[in-house]
Amino acid sequence: MKPYYEDEYVTLYHGDARDYLAAQPDQSVACVITDPPYTERTHTKARSLHGDEIREGITTFGAITDDDLRILLAEMGRVSQGWVIATLDYAHAFEYDQRPPEGLKCQRVGVWVKRNPTPQITGDRPAQGWEAIAYLHREKGRSKWNGGGKHGNYYTMTDGRQGHPTAKPLAVIEDLVSKFTAEGGLVLDPFAGSGTTLLAARNLGRKVIGVELEEKYCELIAKRLDATPLPLLVKEPEAPVTATAAFDFGERLHPANPEIRSSGWSKTPNWAPRRVGLSHSEGLA
């Protein structure tokens, strides 16, 4: 599998996560942070409101079966040295809490509560308004993270500006990268989507590998990374990003309030991104 995009920190592959994971050795990455596709059940039932238009279902990327999701999470656990963190349908998260994928244990189920959720369009029941976060870890070995006794829940706006229907807020993913990896650690996202995990890891000075099946999203990621130069100074998110008060925490993560960095500065080397193997003649943005 040849890289689609590379820079000092990011390597993006255009291909199937199953093929990539199968070719990787055990414990070859420090941590997996990912947002897998929904199942066909969720794809079919999902509705979204765009202005006055109601859109039925999710058609911009393929669904995944329950069995395949379990198998792939087990493979992620095999290649990870510790954590596998995945945003999931709540039914899957609670299932894995009781019966985790092979080789993994569930350390916690967290939630991302959306400040601006899609309303329940039928009006006959409350809207969902949140997604589950499964904090899975290799079955063997003791878990550790950089968050001490803090919680792993988030209350913030959705991010609909990235050209992908399920993009996660950059500040949330940066916080996960900071809390679950050490500086210099290698992060993997086998379902790269809009590239948020890749950008978050790069912002924090981590090496990161992404895999994305849809070429249109590979191109979206490449353009997003090209348009966001790596700062000469990399900062870690500050402690208040996981404040005890959920509403205060949500304010800290609002996209309009990006001041979530601390004074823990470290210099990073100069870099030059390059696209690899593109089928068109477009240059760097």
Image: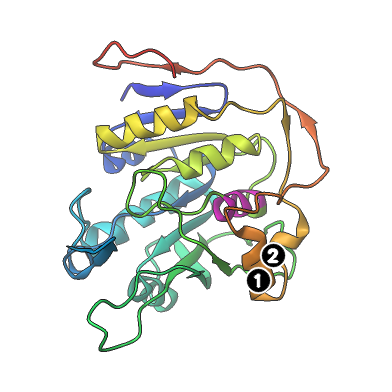
The residue that mark 2 highlights is 242
Q: Residue furthest bottom?
A: 124
Left or right: 36 as drawn, with respect to 103? left
Going 49% across and 44% down the picture, which residue do you hit?
Answer: 197
Q: Is residue 235 visible?
A: yes
In contact (CB < 8 Å): disc 2 and disc 1: yes
As for residue 172 lying within the magenta part, the answer is yes
* Nearer-the-camera pick, 252 or 142: 252
Upstream in sequence: badge 2 or badge 1: 1
x 37%, y 16%: residue: 276
In the picture, the disc for residue 151 is: 1
**Residue at x 67% of width, y 28% of height:** 231
Q: Quadrant of the C terminus?
A: top left
User: Dot 1: what SS?
Assistant: loop
Quarter of the figure with residue 13: top left
Horizontal and vertical percent for residue 46? 23, 67
